[in-house]
Image: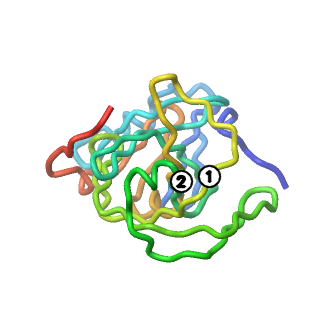
Amino acid sequence: DGLLGAGMMDLSNAVFDASTSSLLIPPRGTADGAFLDSKANPEFIALPLFKGDMQMPYIDITIHGKTRTFLIDTGAGPNSLEPDFAAELNLPKDSEGGSLDGAGGSKVENIHRVIARDNLIGGKVCPGELPYFVFAVRAKVILPESKSFGGILGIKTLAALGAFVDLGSYSLIVPAKFAAKEVMPSSP
């Protein structure tokens, strides 16, 4: 019936709990970092997010040593890679010829899926291997000049991580069990 956007969630300091698909909205007047403060213990890692156009949350992801900026999209199921980034990574196709339904009845045809084994989210979280569908995101994406768009981090990965998207502190909060054992090299 409608869309509750990141701008509204930002104004209300909302937190999206990916493991339960719940939107947590604190009482009016709650401090920006209140949820993050409640998770400030060794069991969690807080990763800073970039605030993009229309308050959309972004995070850097390093795949096979190459870093790009990804939109965190709680409305998207799977992850995606931009075709130019997928070509640069030279990942073998896992499947091809599929389609995905998107917002507003849009559909993307003739896509393929790749599996990336070396992923590092926010420089600190290593989720293991992740599937990505390769297609060009048609939405308007405005990033800081120094950033390059890599794709979308979808709800399936966020849920598997048990992550919280905290728009009060613009942080992605992840259980510490996903902490990278050693930091992989990243490219600028």
Q: Residue furthest top?
A: 145
Question: What residue appears at the point 34 percent right and 51 percent down from the top-left corner?
Answer: 63
Question: What residue appears at the point 39 percent right and 69 percent down from the top-left corner?
Answer: 92
Q: Residue furthest left?
A: 182
What amino acid type should be assigned to the residue bearing mark 2? Pro
Name the colouring of the figure: rainbow
Q: The C terminus is located in which quarter?
A: top left
Q: Are marks 1 and 2 in contact (CB under 8 Å)?
A: yes
Q: Return the mark for residue 83.
A: 2
Out of 57 and 22, give the one closest to the viewer: 57
Provide the secondary structure element on which disc 1 rests: loop
Q: Check disc 1 and report the residue beneath it.
A: 136
Out of 7 and 107, give the one closest to the viewer: 107
Percent across and percent down for residue 101 are: 71, 66
Question: What residue appears at the point 62 percent right and 75 percent down from the top-left corner?
Answer: 98
The alpha-carbon separation of the residues under discs 1 and 2 comes to 6 Å
Provide the secondary structure element on which disc 2 rests: helix
